[in-house]
Image (cartoon, rainbow, N blue to C red):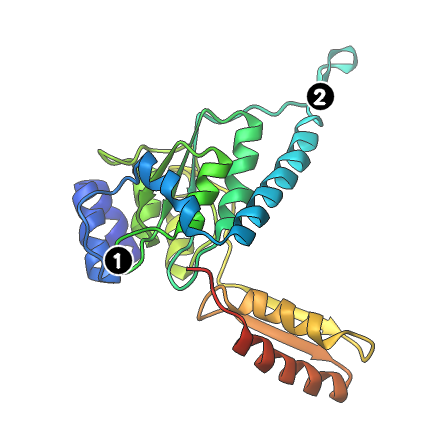
Amino acid sequence: MVEHILSEVRARGDQALLDFEWRLDGVKFKKLEVTRKEMSRARSKVAPELVAALELAAERIRAFHVKCKRQSWVDFAEGGLGQWVRPLERVGVYVPGGKASYPSTLLMTAIPARVAGVKEVIVTSPPGRDGEIAPAILLAAEIAGVDRVFKAGGAQAVAAMAFGTKTIPKVDKICGPGNIFVQLAKKTVYGTVGIDGFYGPTETIVVADGTANPVYCAADLLAQAEHDAMASAILVTTSEKLAGAVSREVDKQAAELGRYP
């Protein structure tokens, strides 16, 4: 199926993207690119505490990667040995957005690209049933200084960034996590385009003894379990008491927590 999607997008471009969004996700719209006006309106639709959290996160992510960039060095006095960081021309960021939105994914991929000096950063993210991308993702795109955002998800979005369409430009590297179809698509196009790695569905294990805090254990498990229906979050412990406490805490937190639309 993934190979079929990739070949269709490569052959039919934008029309194939729109067709697959309708056939696979039940979302029908005519325009792939998000306008600057739509991006600027997103801030008013996001809770103030989330706005503040995203801005703080962006500041910290940027500061960290600025320091990483300083590690570039070339010492011609010792045979020209060293490490030289050079930016790519264009990077594509895939941001999951099906059952939940992940603005942090956008910040942690787009900001390092900007710090490195990448000339153009584009984002693809699947729209909701209303045909719109989650406001939190659009706000993150604005904060990170992304150039363009497109409504496209799944393997079809990966294909568009790998091969290019009339609307979505071909990129040098694709970054970002996604479901099993996104990962298979990234694996298939690797070589045609660079990729950052294969991320998701999540498999995580929390190893804890009887001294662990069940609240923290449950929070760690839930933070990973929400990534995908196929995600696997497992607690390994020698304490029956802790296992019971974490189980109860997982139920409690899951009932209280919501997902940002």
Residue at image mark 1: 130
Sequence order check: which comes first, mark 1 or mark 2? 2
30 relative position to 197: left or right: left
Q: Residue furthest right?
A: 211
Q: CA distance from mark 1 to mark 2?
A: 49 Å
Three-letter residue code for mark 2: Trp
Element assignment for label 1:
loop
Q: Position of residue 166 (x, y in %)?
A: 22, 33
Tag nearer the camera, 1 or 2: 1
Residue 64 shows which numbered tag?
Answer: none
Three-letter residue code for mark 1: Asp
Q: In the image, what residue occupies the spot 42% across and 47% down?
A: 44
Whether residue 174 is visible to the viewer of this picture, yes or no, is no
Where the C terminus falls, by quadrant?
Answer: bottom left
Q: Is residue 51 above or below residue 37?
A: below
Q: Nearer the viewer, residue 103 or 135?
A: 135
Quadrant in the rendering for residue 150:
top left
Q: Is residue 132 above or below residue 165?
A: below
Residue at image mark 2: 73
203 relative position to 238: left or right: left
Q: In the image, what residue occupies the spot 16% across and 45% down?
A: 15
253 relative position to 208: left or right: left
Quadrant in the rendering for residue 122:
top left
Q: Nearer the viewer, residue 118 or 78?
A: 118
Q: In the image, what residue occupies the spot 24% across and 36% down?
A: 165
Element assignment for label 2:
strand
Q: Position of residue 29 (x, y in %)?
A: 19, 50
Q: In the image, what residue occupies the spot 56% across and 23% down?
A: 86
Q: Position of residue 218 (x, y in %)?
A: 65, 74
Q: Position of residue 53 (x, y in %)?
A: 58, 49
